Amino acid sequence: MPSSSDADHPPRIPPSAPSPQPTASQAVSAPADPDATLADTIARHADDPDFVTALARGLAVLLALSDKKRRMSIAQVSHLTGIPRAAARRSLHTLGKLGFVAADEARRFYLRPRVLSFSHGYLSASPLAVLAQPVLDRLGEALHEACSLATLDGDEIVYLARSASSRIMSPNLNVGRRLPAYCTSVGHVLLAHLPPDELNSYLARVRFHPYTEYTPTSADVLLPLLAAVRESGFAFASQLMEPRLCTLAVPVHDAGGNYVAGINVILQGRLVSRADMAERFYQPVARAAMELGSLLLP
């Protein structure tokens, strides 16, 4: 992370990394549905006698329902998660009895408000989310742009907070939303600072999915982007996840030097160059990241 003096000067922008545009062969090799890895994860633990497959399937069903903007049938849940239809039906039945899901007259399932108890408990007890909120609010007011905080959780980032003054944004960027690390600016700043063995492990298991024509779809494309992050101190992502969405992120590290999160500024519906984003936003975002990091114990 840049030092306090670095935050007062524009970063040195290294030569542009190769544009992350997939080739035709890369696009074909990507999985048809990135959520299919839920079933893969469960299958990897099939030989673990202490692993409760039914519980894992129920959680996978909850994640599937939370990830889509529509109500889903049993068949759709089964297809999305890779869980057998009979097991998906039993999971939905159980979750319904517990008050976490409900079904409409067409037997399409949706989440009930009770699921918010999980996220509320975490966000209200997390020092990172609690301490970040006023920092993000001040940053958003100063920039007149949407700002968010996210952390790395497994192979994805999860948004923990956003500035109160943020404009209406894509649902993909709301608090609690999970996104693949390889196609987000916060993901890039955190992947770039992983220990080499952890980064190699991530690259060996991640399944790239071409959300847009600019999404990194291989390790060969992603690694130069991470090298650029380490050199410049920030990550820039343009249309990697959805069209006309640009973000710039800076890492947050705690008092012990551990990289724990990333703060980003989000421009939706506008395309801005890497150089212009750095000139306009790097300094204030870096100062906010250092302010938050100084409050976090190792």
Image (spheres, rainbow, N blue to C red):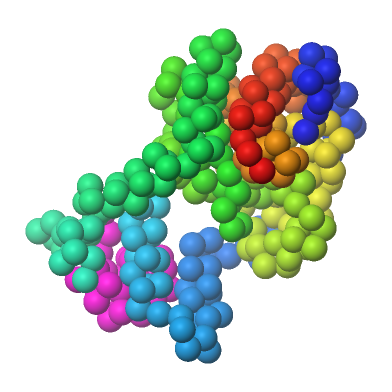
Q: Residue at x 66, y 43 (%)?
A: 298
Question: Residue at image x 53%, y 29%?
Answer: 132
Image x and y of residue 31, in percent: 58, 65
Residue 188 visible from this viewpoint: no
| Picture layout, residue 248 above or below residue 215 | above
User: Residue 120 sits in which quadrant?
Assistant: top left
| Residue span colored magenta | 70-93
- Is residue 139 on the magenta stretch? no
Give the vertical position of 95 relative to 85 (above or below): above
Query: Going 23% across and 51% down the picture, which residue do you hit?
Result: 114
Q: Is residue 52 visible?
A: yes
- The front one of 269 and 102 is 102
Is 178 rendered above or below residue 228?
A: below
Give the image quarter of residue 91. bottom left
Judged from this view, the residue extending furthest toward the front is 297
In what quadrant of the picture does the N terminus appear?
Answer: top right
> Foreground: 270 or 10?
10
Residue 230 x/y as whole percent: 83, 39
**Which residue lies most toward the left here?**
105
For the stretch drawn in magenta, the main secondary structure is helix
Name the residue located 57 percent from the left edge and 17 percent from the top edge: 139
Residue situated in front as seen by the camera: 173 or 251: 251
Residue 60 location, quadrant: bottom left
Q: Is residue 84 left or right of residue 188?
A: left
Q: Is residue 73 magenta?
A: yes
Establish if 39 lies above or below 177. below
